[in-house]
Amino acid sequence: MIRKQAFGAVPEGPVDLYTITNSSGIEVHAMNYGGIIVSMRVPDNKGMTADVALGFDTLDGYLNNKPYFGAIIGRYGNRIANGKFTLDGTEYQLARNDSPNSLHGGIKGFDKVLWHGEHFGNNQGVGVTFTYTSKDGEEGYPGNLETKVTYTLTDENALQIEYEAVTDKATPVNLTNHSYFNLAGEGAGNILKHQLMLNAERFTPVDGTLIPTGEFRPVARTPFDYTKPTTIGSQIDADNKQLAIAHGYDHNFVLNRKRSGLELAGRIHELKTGRVLKVYTTEPGIQFYTGNFLDGTVAGKHGHAYDKHAAFCVETQHFPDSPNHPNFPSTILMPGQTYYSRTVYKFSTE
Ligand code: BGC
């Protein structure tokens, strides 16, 4: 079932909130401002529902959404070094909003624009499609980029996100969603007791400004080894230079892939409530971020102060700063090509 209601307005127009529900008790709220997933209400192993997504109660909170709670990220997820890259001999300078780098699309990224929403029901489930055209030169990026993001909630308790884009000039594109999860419920403390499995034998270490050095480093015998289910808090404080740089995890993991298509990227289990989140994706990487920059100053839903590690993000993506790393999978979309990627958040209990 899907319902649309007014949720305020921004200078570009009215903001609509979509309530998407399935037959097994999951309820997702999403809005056309930033394409933001506002909430995900999911049952636990006793049938008790909680909202597992950090965010705000009202649109006002989201107008100053510094952590990017729930938002669509584009044109480029994560950082591009010094906001610079060269394409076909032309150097481009992007808006720099994370000194000295460009982060998550720049000053006014896809998280802060008003999308056009259309809701639907089909044999896969119910959901909403958001479209947005990013103009040639927006935030410094070349080409008019027509973007479409579709959220579908299925009766199998999966929230599927599909990303599509076409361009009229070659441009980097790397779209993702920036939901912050706490499987015990938003505001229910930190996520350090959650158990994590990541289907990744390597990760991309970073320099002091969180730009990948270009290396693919094995996780074996490091606190980055989540190839078997491991409690996040048991490794996060290890004496490790990469953890020190990022104040926790804020790293791109290179997913093990045997083929292209949708594959399991990770699994997170909260033992008290029994909630399990499995993440499947067609992308080659996943940014595992443990909310290191949350510091209790953001007043979230129900006035909850979100402290450091109050949530984790699992941002499925191509690797950060790919336009400056020829050894990374390419993120350049060419005219005539269609960008397509798909990620599924599957909820269950144990
Ligand atoms: C980045 C973090 C950043 C966070 C919120 C993550 O994707 O990797 O470094 O602080 O988003 O902006």
Image: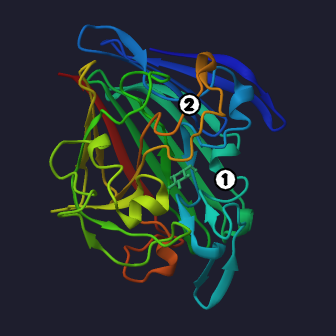
Residue toward you, 192 or 289: 192
Local packing at callout 1 (Cα closer than 10 Å; few below 14, some 14-19, many 20+) is: many
Q: Is mark 1 within 8 Å of ligand 1?
A: no
Quadrant for the C terminus, please: top left
Residue at the image position 60 percent from the left and 33 percent from the top: 296
Quadrant for the N terminus, please: top left
Confirm whether residue 136 shows in the render.
no
Can you tell which quarter of the image residue 80 is in?
bottom right
Residue 237 in percent (x, y) is at 36, 50
Left or right? Give the position of 74 relative to 242: right
Residue toward you, 138 or 317: 317
Confirm whether residue 79 shows in the render.
yes
Q: Is mark 2 within 8 Å of ligand 1?
A: no
**Which amino acid type is shown beneath numbered disc 2?**
Tyr
Local packing at callout 2 (Cα closer than 10 Å; few below 14, some 14-19, many 20+) is: many
Residue that extends furthest to the bottom in the rendered view of this protein: 89
Q: Give the residue number, with chain letter if any, for mark 2.
A: 306
Can you tell which quarter of the image residue 278 is in?
top left
Residue 141's label in the rendered image is none
Can you tell which quarter of the image residue 229 is in?
top left
Q: Give the residue number, with chain letter if any, for mark 1.
A: 109
Residue 111 in percent (x, y) is at 63, 45
Left or right? Give the position of 40 relative to 200: right
